Structures are given as structure tokens and as C-alpha cells.
Amino acid sequence: MRKLPNRKAKFNRGPNAFILLLALLGLSIAYMFWYNSIAKDREQITFSTFLSQVESGNVKAVQISDQSVFGEFKKSVPMATRDNQLKQVGYFSTTVVSPDNLWQKMHDNGVIMEVEQQDKQPWVPYALFFLVFPFLLAVLYYFFKQSQGGASGSKIFNIGKSKARFFSPNTIKIKFKDVAGVEEAKEDLQDVVDFLKNPEKFKRIGAKIPRGVLLTGAPGNGKTLLAKAVAGEASCPFFSISGSDFVEVFVGVGASRVRDLFLQARRHTPCIVFIDEIDAVGRHRGAGFGGGNDEREQTLNQLLAEMDGFGTEPGEVIVLAATNRPDVLDKALLRPGRFDRKVEVPYPDLASREKILNIHIKGVKVGEDVDLQKIARGTPRFSGADLANLINEAALLASKRDREVVIMDDFEIARDKILVGAERKTLSRSKEAIEMTAYHESGHTLVVLLAPNTPPFHKVTILSRGGALGMTWYLPDGDEISKSEDEILSEIKVCLGGRLAEEIIYGKARRTTGAVSDLKRSTKLAYDMVVHYGMSELGPISLSSREGMKEYSSDTERKVDEQVRKIIDKCYDETKQLLLDNKDKLDSLAQALVERETLDAVEVYELLGLENPSKSYSFQGDEEESEEDQDKEHDIDSNVDGLEE
């Protein structure tokens, strides 16, 4: 097997050579300074002065070169300078016409004479030239390369080249088996794999493989991973680039990069071109003004032409693109012939979450009490990235506690931290405030336990996390697809339970603002029942608004408000009666919370003497949507009812 060259060692020789050249330059400069300092000490004297010093025997030695004489006096001679100041001169230079008796006089006075040959050329200036000049060129070239991106060459000449990363088939090890869940998406993408592996099977009967496949879905659900898995399954070359890599401040650069990308791709057919975050370059055209927008539109136009234009060359180049904003893409990009197929990558369901946890748990030491199925039940609407983060947070927590393995409690605390926020240990509350919080959460808990059509209860706490002073956790039995009218009414009752518990114990005059999120949630649920779901006396009609404009009259709007009020009032009265009938349980639960701060399902059922319908569950909790989170895609359908500050 041929040994590959040591690129690192080769790269390290560059700085060593640079230091050597720098040392040579320093020596050359030092020599020049030394030579100039000697020349500066030599004083130019007249020939008569020189002759008189020879006759007086004060000249020690001379060096004769043509008509120039350089010499040294035995004793320094005071001489007047141009500014009429006396200066002691030890070294001198002069010019002679070589009179016949001069050499004899110097010989008679014991002057040491050295004669330089006429054809001898000075070597020092040439040596300095051949050393310093190449060095200066090397330095200029080195800094030019560094400023232009190093060994990759000058960016000014490569600005129109594609920035796509190329992966050869043998470097992509990811397969479909490495992508947990999303079975429907993998089935759609299997057609692309089959075409890349055996295109003749499709061509034989006239079938055409989609030119482009658009992967859509919320962030963190594995769109990029699926694209890599397609390339790994097909064992074909893979080009990866981000949509933002096409656009530059220079007009025309993006279009040039698109041309270069597809030119490279056609040289490696069959292959896959993956464009991540395609919405950066594929937005609706004509939505803005200015040079930046013109550049983006030119880039998009070129992309459209390359995928399916008049001059498009045939070839097995499959374009995969990913975005979580398909609504902003240009319609021309989504038409058949370009992105023929749209594959939705949704949040993983219960079974998929368990598979994802099994993949990410590899390499993490976990305790015997860890049940991934229970963790999966407690993480609805978690993406694959969220689940990976959950495992990492639990491992970090176990490390902080100096444990050798991660236990179930670490996962529970990590999940609470991700969904709600870190525990606020420094928050100072009075005994009365703690007791009021306990009654508020006990009201939520009792409604969950006693009202019909509610999910299994799991945990209640008065420990403050994030913006909540306390929380009640409950969890649906499985992945919820739809909700019945009775389930929505029970959820409204759970939201009202906290406020009603405060009123029963402390009276209406001492109601707090802590129930603000509960009231928003209950009002929204009642409004949705009337306007969207047709669950009111107005009948099975939908009054959904479009673009913020109401599609019904003022009279209908008044009726909608009346129905919302009627639903809330009915739930309010029934919940209040439920809590009054079980006031002893409310008091017992609140006092236990004050003493122990957190109670799980088993402890609550034992305390109240109720039968536990879900003894097999030990992983608690799920998050209630706040008003701000209801518009986000990472909303949680199951509940955490909390008392806000």
C-alpha cells in the first residue's frame, strides 16, 4: 500500500524557509550598515595633504585601486570639516594621478601598500542583490497568497467558481438505516436511489425520474441527513452547498457559481447536488429593489435554467434541496420539471423518537433505570436535534454530579430545563407566596385527576423554573392527531383550576396575576371551538379569518363572543364545584407540596387515596404552550400548567 505524503510536514516547511530567508535578510542589512559605517569614518582628503603625511611618515598602510587610494594614519590628524570644525581623522581616501616618485616615497617611509587588480569586480553588491531581491519577491508572494486565501489561489480569479464541497462515493458512510423514523420520506427518496443505481430500468418504459426533490420540515428533523443517506445508498458523487454561498456583492457572481456547480456535476454523472437552505436564493422574484436583490434574482434565474431550461443538457444530475420555509420559494422553482417532488420531514412520532434516542444514546453510559420508551413518551414534538440535545444535557448533569452513569432523574431534569428553563434557586419567596403557589398548582392537579377525558397525571412542583413559579405536568397516552370536544373542555377546566383554587382559599379579592397564561390558553381554546372547530351553538361552521381580516359580520362577531363566554362560564362553574367537593384533597395536596416541593404521580395518588391508572409511567412532564409559543412550530400539545410570575 502506497504511503500518502505527509501534507502536514510539507506545510510546516513553509514557515521554516520563511524564517531562514528572514535571517539572511537581517545579516545582509547588518553587513550593509557595517560597511557604511566604515565608509563613513573615511575622510576625503586632498592629494597634497596625503603627500605631506607620507613624507612625514604618518601613513601606516594604503589600498590602491586604479586612481583611488584608501589608507590609515598612524596617528589621527586634526582636519577642518566643511562647517569649519576640527575633526580627528584616522582613515582617509584620496585620488592620485600616479606620479612616478609617489610609490618610492611611500616605500621609503615604510607604508604598507596593497594594489587591487583592475579587472577585479566587487562581489558584495552582487551578493546582496541576488539574496535580497528574490527574498523580497518571496515575501510579496507569501503575503499575497495569505491575503487571497492561501494555497487555494487568488480569490479575485476564483470568485466565480462554485463553493460546493465534493464527496466521493467511498467517503459517504451514511445509509437509510442510520436515519431513524421518517419512513414515508425514505420511501419517497428510494425512487431517486433506484434511478441512480439502475437508470435503465426507468428509461426502458419511458419513466422520468424527478429532476429535483425538495425536503421541507421544521429545523432539526434530519433533512440534511436524509440527503446524505440518499448519496450513501446510491454510492454516487455528492456535491453539497448552502444557498447563501451563491450570492455575493458583485452582480453576476452567483449565476457564474451556479453554472460552475452544474458543469462540475455533469462531469461526475450520475450524481447528487444538495442545496441546503435554498430559500436564501430561491425567494419570490420582484419582491425588492437594489443591486443585492438583482444579484439574487440573476442567481435564481440561472438555477432555473440549469435545472430545466432551453439549453439544459440531459444527464443524471439529481438536485436535492432543503428548506423550512417552502412558502417563500418562487413558483417557477416548484413547478414540475424542476422540483417535481416535495418530501415532508415531520416531527418524529413516538416510535421514531425511541429509535432516534437509541442512535444518540450510543457512547453514553446509562444506568439500568433508564427507559428510552418512557423518555420518548415524555418528549412529544421533539425533533431529532432536540432529542440529541436532551441526551447531552443529561450526560452533562451526571458529570457535574460526579456520577459514572446517567440515570433517569438526569433525563427528567434535563427535559425540564430544555422546555421550561433552569431552576431559579436564588428566587426569594415568602411563606405565604409559597403556600399560594402550592394551592394554585394543587388546583390544576386535582382537575387533571378528577375531571373526565384528561391525560394521565405525572408530576407537580412549586419549584420555580424559567418564568413559572410552579408547574403541573401531564402527558397524553400517545401521539395526538385530533382532540374531541370533551377533551378540549377538560383542558379548559385544567387551565381554570389554578385560579379557582386561589379564589376558594383566599377569596376573589386576593386573586393574583400568576394565572395570566392559564386564562390566555383557556380563552384561545374556547375561541377555536367556536370559530375553527364548529363546536358551539352556532353550528358546524368555520369562521376562520384570512390575512387578519374577519370574514363575518359584526352581528356574528357578537355571537362568537357570546359563545366563547358561555363555554368559559360553564367550565368555570363545573370546575369550581369539583374543587369545592374535594376541598379536603386540595388542602392535603397543597400542604404536601409546601413540605416536599415536588410530588410525582405515585406519591400524589397515594396521598389522595386514588387509584393510579398509569403505574408503569415514571418519566414525567410535558410543556404547555405559552401565548408566545403558540405560533411556533415547536409547540407542545400536551400540557404543563404553571403559575407565572
Image: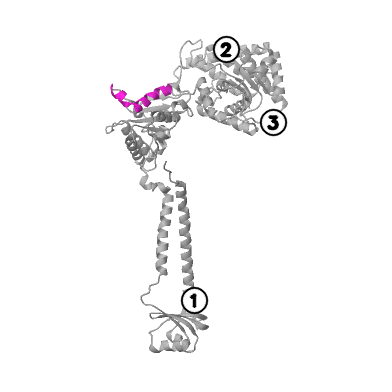
Q: Main secondary structure of the magenta part?
A: helix
The CA distance from mark 2 to mark 3 is 37 Å
The CA distance from mark 3 to mark 1 is 84 Å
Q: Nearer the viewer, residue 411 or 62?
A: 62
Residue segment shown in magenta: 184-205
Residue 247 falls inside the magenta stretch: no
Q: Nearer the viewer, residue 352 or 339?
A: 352
Marker disc for residue 41 = 1
> Residue drawn at (42%, 69%), measured in percent from left and top?
124
> Residue drawn at (55%, 13%), measured in percent from left and top?
487
Could one spot residue 420 in this view of the protein?
no
In the rendering, at what x and y percent does residue 377 appear?
A: 56, 20
Neighbourhood count class around disc 2 (C-alpha, 10 Å): few under 14, some 14–19, many 20 upward:
some
Left or right: 328 as drawn, with respect to 616: left
Marker disc for residue 428 = 3
Figure quadrant of the N terminus: top left
Image quadrant where residue 258 sits: top left
